[in-house]
Image (cartoon, rainbow, N blue to C red):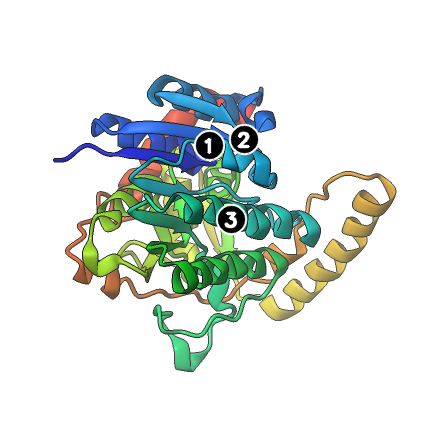
Amino acid sequence: MPKFKCLVTGACGFIGSHMVELLAENGHEVIATDVQSTINAQEPIKKECVLTTQKMAQKLIPCDITSQKEVEKLPLDVDYVFHIASVFSYAAPWEILYRVNVQGTTNLLEAIRKTQGVKRFVLWGAGGVYGEPKPEYTPFTEETPPDPPNNYQRAKWFQEFTTMLYSKKYGIKYTILRPTTVYGIRQFYGGVDFLRTGHKAGMLGLPSNMNTHVPFVHVKDVCNMALYLAQKPEAENEIFNSNDDSRMTMIDVMRFIAAIYGKPFMLLPPMPMGAIKDILLFIADIEGYITQKVLKKKGLLEKDQLGMMNLDFLYSNDKLKATGYKFLYPDPKEGLIEAMKWYEEGRYFDK
């Protein structure tokens, strides 16, 4: 296998640290970059991400991608750029989401345009850009028109659009991944909440009508497919849904989580999920106002995330598999068990 020189942005985060690890383990030269505040992270799980990147990358360069001057100082004499850096938060203000996710991407593309040496720009998009499921677009395919339902997804869609615009105007070759529910070790936000619930709850249960699907993908698969597709001519200037073959429902997931933690699981009678969702959204409005406007801190409930509650998300990965990609974790059960053991051995949920 030929060896490449690669730049990884957001390299000290959950996915970024795995991308650095994969590239280094395959003998590639890795230049890692992240914002200084992330590099300085002291929270136990976040620190594990940083330590992994510091160990595996040839260089770790502090860089705020919202600063064009800082971005232009990055060494861009590389074969591939894996652009993972983003604000991943449904609660973040639009100004921050736009500045980091959209303007930061623009700054990076502008610097790449000036060097004209990058073989492929691989962008981490988001599976949520399709919006709420509709019968005529089930499952979601890459041909489904984007309809981002919240500020986070809108910023991710603008990020994709900016990438495609630079490709059309300046010939930058790209591949865009749209991951779904990513999981794995060293995660501190998102899919890890399933495991955190299993650890902390005395018992688990769900209403019998909460049977919507959870689209999973292991973090190692997301990174592996990024490296795989970056080298594929047929993946040039293409978008790929990034999800495994599983079709687990919320009930399947929580029953499995209960089993691996040795906790009882109770299937509850059907409940009016629409009404419950409306109540939670109302509470989130009030709680958000008090915490953000009055107390000046992040709230516990994320309204935009609640908006996706009890929606049935199904994704097609046929386009990805047509390239010949083989999943490391076609089913999430093995990966969830591995992750659970890692969190329990490190007692990360108790810190």
| Residue 170 falls left or right of residue 193 | left
Residue type for callout 1: Leu
On the image, numbered disc 1 is attached to which residue? 74
Is 284 in front, or is 109?
Answer: 109
Is 197 in front, or is 286?
Answer: 286
Which labelled disc corresponds to residue 166? none
- Image quadrant in which the N terminus is located: top left
On the image, numbered disc 3 is attached to which residue? 105
Is 178 in front, or is 280?
Answer: 178
Residue type for callout 2: Cys
SS of the residue under disc 2: loop
For the residues bearing labels 1 and 2, Cβ distance under 8 angstroms: yes
Rounded to the nearest angstrom, the CA distance separating label 3 from label 1 is 14 Å
Is 342 in front, or is 82?
Answer: 82
Rounded to the nearest angstrom, the CA distance separating label 2 from label 3 is 13 Å
Locate residue 333, reporting x and y percent: 30, 44
Determine whether 289 is above or below 263 in the image. below
Locate residue 137, reporting x and y percent: 40, 77
Q: Earlier in the sequence, mark 3 or mark 1?
A: 1
Residue type for callout 3: Thr
Residue drawn at the location 46% of the way across and 44% of the way down: 191
Residue positioned most to the bottom:
136
For the residues bearing labels 2 and 3, Cβ distance under 8 angstroms: no
Determine whether 263 is above or below 177 in the image. above
Residue drawn at the location 51% of the way across and 56% of the way down: 159
| Residue 266 falls left or right of residue 151 | left
Locate residue 4, reporting x and y percent: 24, 34
- Image quadrant in which the C terminus is located: top right
How many residues crowd mark 2 within 10 Å: few (<14), some (14–19), many (20+)? many
Locate residue 87, reporting x and y percent: 57, 44
On the image, numbered disc 2 is attached to which residue? 63
How many residues crowd mark 3 within 10 Å: few (<14), some (14–19), many (20+)? many
